[in-house]
Amino acid sequence: MDHIVVTVNGQARPLPGVAAHTTLLDALRGLGLTGCKEGCAEGECGACAVLLATADEHGGTEWTAVNACLVPAAAVDGQEVVTSEGLGTPAAPHPVQAGLAAGGGSQCGYCTPGFACSMAAEFYRAGRAPADGASHHDHDHDHGELGPNGFDLHALSGNLCRCTGYRPIRDAAFELGAPETADPLAERRARPAPEPVATRLAADGARFVRPMSLDEALRLVRDEPDAVVVAGCTDWGVDVNLRGQRAGLAVAIERLPELRALTVGDASIEIGAALSLSEIGRRLAGRVPLLDEVFPQFASPLIRNRATLGGNLGTGSPIGDTPPALLALEARVVLASADGEREVDLADYFTGYRTTVRRPDELIRAVRIPLPLAHVTAFHKIAKRRYDDISSVAIAFALDIDDGVVASARIGLGGVAASPIRARATEAALFGQPWNDEIVRNAASVLGSEGTPMSDHRASAEYRALMLEGALLKLHRTHPIAAAEAEVPA
């Protein structure tokens, strides 16, 4: 096949000339839809945001904001996309567009279409409703990051503006009402999202393949070990854009049903490797408090709407945010190949800088978190920005404290070695000891010496060591014995 077909702004559009590495952004701009822009080409600024029709948990559709600069165009073959041009027209602007204009939420306008799409995704979010006792015009009522109209301002945390300033954009978001009954994008939510379609795209000497089963995908990676496996493309998309990386064969796996299950059993929670972080957070619904701390600090909603656990572990990056948390949770990785499955303790999975025990013919099928969970958990991310940034150091804690004594301690670290690691020496220093100031201070000095931190543009080695020490001291301050012995959520 030499082209794909995508429904763009309600119209089926053949996209000829699309290659395996062509981004959705470039394909849309090739259609003359130049509202979405390339600002950073790595999913950080949000100028490229568009809406993608994705399946909700009730058989309907939700409008999900994604970075078009990272998503391969071939990955949306047979899918539905809405750009800023599809929201409204100059004569009949969408409520989001009208609100931005009326509130002065745009100056140069470069970032505005991306803001409009991210804002529209939150505008159509199921369950968004005015806060108790507040109208959507009540700006004096203090709701923090949640507007009086139920608008979650964090929905815009992946969109950056250089000249307007965020106050008028915030005001426009908090003035939005509910979608009108006849709003076509609101009505669309009641119908199922498009099913994935088998894609076999060949262009410019490269192929993009979307298999329809895990078995087919496993045969592909077995027969062609140089294939690049892609899910959310939040990592490979950056390599394509900024490093000119090209793949002879890209295999898309994020829609495979076998990789999208989430089950809670008596002994473990199993999370499919291809579920997006946003989906995982919603479906876990607070069952794993440590992950609830990680996800809001993981990049931005635009990234979390595509990024997967399988991708975060598959890259082997030493600065990923989820590996330290999963290490603290004693997670295990389920690896699948055409010959069967095997299960690996995550602490044994990483072998060096961006290297793991996963063979070229294997895919990460799932991550298993053993139950019961530890009573005390915390995630500390040290970065230059609170949101939408890469961590300098990431520390995850999972402790059980019985009668004031540390009964178990698991600590995962990122950013202080060539790969994510367990802080084994610190765990040993805490185990069986009283949870008191003296023991914690001694253990904190041990934690400061864990790993082999280096100095780079994000932080010095000395700073990283100090942050490790401070994290354990902070954990003790915020989790005294009374809190430490509290029950974890059911």
Image (cartoon, rainbow, N blue to C red):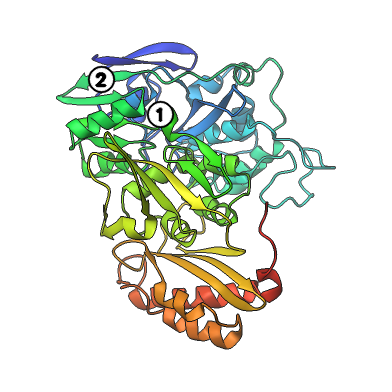
Give percent across and percent down for residue 22: 28, 28
Camera-nearest residue between 161 and 57: 57
Please report the residue visible at 48 percent of the width from the left and 67 percent of the height from the top.
410
Spatial CA span between label 2 and label 1: 18 Å
Rendered image quadrant of residue 178 = top right
Reply above or below: 386 against 407. above
Q: Which residue is mark 2?
A: 201
The residue type indicated by label 2 comes to Leu
Question: In this image, 142 relative to 438: left or right?
Answer: right
The crowding category of the residue bearing disc 2, from other C-alpha atoms within 10 Å (few below 14, some 14 to 19, many at least 20), is many
Please report the residue visible at 19 percent of the width from the left and 21 percent of the height from the top.
203
The crowding category of the residue bearing disc 1, from other C-alpha atoms within 10 Å (few below 14, some 14 to 19, many at least 20), is many
Give percent across and percent down for residue 453: 32, 72
Give percent across and percent down for residue 316: 31, 53
Q: Residue lying furthest right in this view? A: 133
User: Is label 2 in contact with label 1 (beta carbons under 8 Å)?
Assistant: no
User: For the residue labelled by badge 1, is the local secondary structure a helix, a strand or a loop?
Assistant: loop
Inspect this view and state whether residue 21 appears.
no
Mark sitting on residue 352? none
Pair 2/1: label in front: 1
User: For the residue labelled by badge 2, is the local secondary structure a helix, a strand or a loop?
Assistant: strand
Rendered image quadrant of residue 72 = top left
Camera-nearest residue between 370 and 459: 370
Q: Which residue is mark 1?
A: 256
Q: Residue lying furthest bottom in this view? A: 438
Inspect this view and state whether residue 418 appears.
yes
